[in-house]
Amino acid sequence: MSSRYDRAITVFSPDGHLFQVEYAQEAVKKGSTAVGVRGKDIVVLGVEKKAIAKLQDERTVRKICLLDDHVAMAFAGLTADARILINRARVECQSHRLTVEDPVTLEYITRYIATLKQRYTQSNGRRPFGISCLIVGFDYDGTPHLYQTDPSGTHHEWKANATGRSAKTVREYLEKHYTDEVADSDAESIKLALKALLEVVQSGSKNVELAVMRRDEPLKMLSVDEIEKIMAEVEKEKEEEAEKKKKTKTS
Amino acid sequence: TTLAFKWQHGVIVAVDSRATAGSYIASQTVKKVIEINPYLLGTMAGGAADCSFWERVLAEQCRIYELRNKERISVAAASKLLANIVYNYKGMGLSMGTMIVGWDKRGPGLYYVDSDGTRLSNNMFSVGSGSTYAYGVLDSGYKWDMSVEEAYELGKRSIYHATHRDAYSGGVVNLYHMKETGWIKVSQTDVMDL
């Protein structure tokens, strides 16, 4: 009976592609945008919140999850797949603490998640995970990190990145506006993440969810009021920019 | 008999070198300190085969950890790896009482691991048939801020006294010093000369 599931699903195409993996990456591109920024003393995660139906309880749709006290992740793609990976990662974080008597490093847990994803691209009867993760946090020596994994099982470290719908636009915005000065300031890093997200999300603090983690502090989800405050600042800055441009044009 | 203690300048490991099969002295020249890698040492007490075999397995696991994680394994993790391995064989007759000694980013480390699955951390341990004699001498002479020479002398003397009274201990005293830069073998002295 089980011989039906012994056939590999992810096989090579004649020109060297793994189509299942590429289709999984397409699934990621359909998911809502997630952005991550690594500052010097802070890491920021932002996600686009899809419009919540009236009768739905908002709190149950959480796209930013804690893997351990010092590691958080956001993802884009199939939420159900993410839940499985998050569970395995959480268990691994604790297992590592037990066997090695140290909290995981970001690199270790990212490698673990990536290895898990790769395994599913080379197993019988299974399909790859349809999610791309942004993993942020601080190692116990205090260095901040931001890693991205994708359905193929590769992982890379980034200073700032985005994934999901319109990730390319967001990434281009980040490339233009990420500087070391921004990274040095906590407030600027948060603003950068928010501004990048607002490039592709309909305006409104109701449509974005922001979370920040500072060194040796737990993950903090920003409340709607706090997001509104930052958005007001961003708006003000935009107006000031527009004013300046007008002045230079007329003179 | 084996002993190890932590002090201001690192960790001292001192062991005898007698192996017995019942009341027959099988060897007077056993190496009871196993050099796992340049900054980790393990001692042998109980079953010689069990200790040397599993500590070699531990060396393999430590190396793989180093390659995978691009940093040296901590003494806590190394001792836990060994403790978990032997716990799987609990009740099946393994006999080992070993001390894992090293220096990692938390400083000098000393753990006692045995075949029951016990794993303890402390500043001083003595394991083996003559351990009670060694403890007596160690406890009365130990001071955290001894000089290096005093510590070498204390380690050697404790083993000597253990070999004097315990029939199953003897041979030579092998003395090691675990420093921040790794371990060094200090000396090998025949107990007849002490």
Image (cartoon, rainbow, N blue to C red):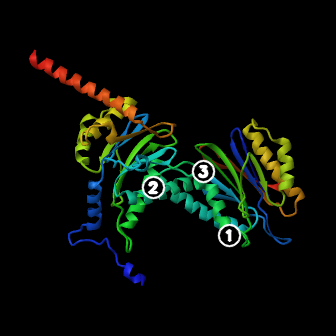
In the image, B155 versus A16, the foreground residue is A16
Q: Determine the image quadrant of residue B92.
A: bottom right
- Residue beneath label 2, please? A86
Q: Is residue B162 left or right of residue A68?
A: right
| Numbered disc 1: secondary structure | loop
Q: Are marks 2 and 3 on the same chain?
A: yes
The residues bearing labels 3 and 1 have C-alpha atoms spaced at a distance of: 22 Å
Q: Position of residue A12 (x, y in %)?
A: 27, 71
Q: Residue at x 54, y 50 (%)?
A: B72
Q: Are marks 1 and 2 on the same chain?
A: no
Q: Residue at x 56, y 56 (%)?
A: A95
The residues bearing labels 2 and 3 have C-alpha atoms spaced at a distance of: 21 Å
Q: Are marks 3 and 1 on the same chain?
A: no
Q: Residue at x 43, y 53 (%)?
A: A110
Name the residue type under label 1.
Answer: Tyr
- Residue beneath label 3, please? A101
Name the residue type under label 3.
Answer: Glu
User: Which chain does the residue under circle 1 lie in?
Assistant: B
